């Protein structure tokens, strides 16, 4: 499928910019729905929306080939009641209003990829979690994932193919978690976190973009897909590989109580570090997707500069 017009909702962050760079180079017209003002940069038009009500932005859906929705308040914050409410509403409201707007168009987007999270699965050290046999977890973060996917699935958009992207930690130089982890390792703080047994699931940003393209072009693709490399490994091993790649010999460990104190002061939650995400991409692999960076070593060699 030739992608001439791509709509990106909530596309001003790290992943949004990666998507813009990839598809604009292919000649696609990019429309970004943003809470900021209207503006144009290159062949990318930024259109204001509030993520919950109809407006002029709805006209842009007409004739679009692809809609990608990344909208949602960052979970990198303290889980107080105000933040928890905004985390949920920002995701659910945007998903619902997009679905309603699609059904008001004469020529709706051919495919809609909606962001979701691989944290929907339970804390798993014992076995991998995939789309077929993975067990849904409990707690606030899982609850967010469940209502988010429910909002997406409940909207009937008969003319639009729909895909849920259960995204794991995306590794890239331009943002996300890798630059932060790199600074910690170079400061000598790159030891195991907690007991180090919790699994880390990740995906290289290039594989993230390739997987999106693969699903857009595969007209049979529908439903939920895990966006994670096929070989999740324990935190202790992951940090050791980072130290090796960055040529750092010392890696002081961070015990759980230390992480709790640190998380309080930097206004985040230790769950982002301590939950075991042993997520694997069974559906992508079964349908023929080939990862360019299937291992941690390949990913770190590609992205980390010693």
Image (cartoon, grey):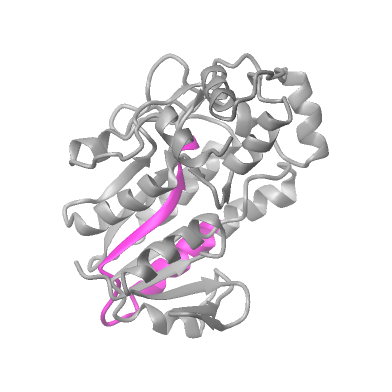
Q: Is residue 40 in sight in this rendering? A: yes
Residue 181, by quadrant, is: top right
Q: Is residue 120 in sight in this rendering? A: no
At a point 49% along the width and 48% down the height, the residue shown is 147
Quadrant of image for the C terminus = top right
Residue 108 is inside the magenta segment: yes
Is residue 302 toward the left or the right of residue 159 in the image?
Answer: right
At a point 69% along the width and 18% down the height, the residue shown is 250
Number of marks in the image? 0
Residue 43, relative to residue 213: is it above or below? below
Magenta segment boundaries in residue numbering:
91-119
Q: Measured from the top left, where is residue 188 in percent x and y? A: 72, 25
Is residue 4 toward the left or the right of residue 54 in the image?
Answer: left
Residue 35, relative to residue 115: is it above or below? below
At a point 60% along the width and 26% down the height, the residue shown is 247
Quadrant of image for the N terminus = bottom left
Q: Measured from the top left, where is residue 85 in percent x and y? A: 66, 52
Residue 93 is inside the magenta segment: yes
Q: Measured from the top left, where is residue 162 in percent x and y? A: 29, 57
* Residue sitting nearer the eye, 239 or 8: 239
Residue 198, by quadrant, is: top right
Is residue 268 toward the left or the right of residue 105 in the image?
Answer: right
Q: Measured from the top left, where is residue 134 in percent x and y? A: 36, 28
At a point 47% along the width and 50% down the height, the residue shown is 148
């Amino acid at each position: 499928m030739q992608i001439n017009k791509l709509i990106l909702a909530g596309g001003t962050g790290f992943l949004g910019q990666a998507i813009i760079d990839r598809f604009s180079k292919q000649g696609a017209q990019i429309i970004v729905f943003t809470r900021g003002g209207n503006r144009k940069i290159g062949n990318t038009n930024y259109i204001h929306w509030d993520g919950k009500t109809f407006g002029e932005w709805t006209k842009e859906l007409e004739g679009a080939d692809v809609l990608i929705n990344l909208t949602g308040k960052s979970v990198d914050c303290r889980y107080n009641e105000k933040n928890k409410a905004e985390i949920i509403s920002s995701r659910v409201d945007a998903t619902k209003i997009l679905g309603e707007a699609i059904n008001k168009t004469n020529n709706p987007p051919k495919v809609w990829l909606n962001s979701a999270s691989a944290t929907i699965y339970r804390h798993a050290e014992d076995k991998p979690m995939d789309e077929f046999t993975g067990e849904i977890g409990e707690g606030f973060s899982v609850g967010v994932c469940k209502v988010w996917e429910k909002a997406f699935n409940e909207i009937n958009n008969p003319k639009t193919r729909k895909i849920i992207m259960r995204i794991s930690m995306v590794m890239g130089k331009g943002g996300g978690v890798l630059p932060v982890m790199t600074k910690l390792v170079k400061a000598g703080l790159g030891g195991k976190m907690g007991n180090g047994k919790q699994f880390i699931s990740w995906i290289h940003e290039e594989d993230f973009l390739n997987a999106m393209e693969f699903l857009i072009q595969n007209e049979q693709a529908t439903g939920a897909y895990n966006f994670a490399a096929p070989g999740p490994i324990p935190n202790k091993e992951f940090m050791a590989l980072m130290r090796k790649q960055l040529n750092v010999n010392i890696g002081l460990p961070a015990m759980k109580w230390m992480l709790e104190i640190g998380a309080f002061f930097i206004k985040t939650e230790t769950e982002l570090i301590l939950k075991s995400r042993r997520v694997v991409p069974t559906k992508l692999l079964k349908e023929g997707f080939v990862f360019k960076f299937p291992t941690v070593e390949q990913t770190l060699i590609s992205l980390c500069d010693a």
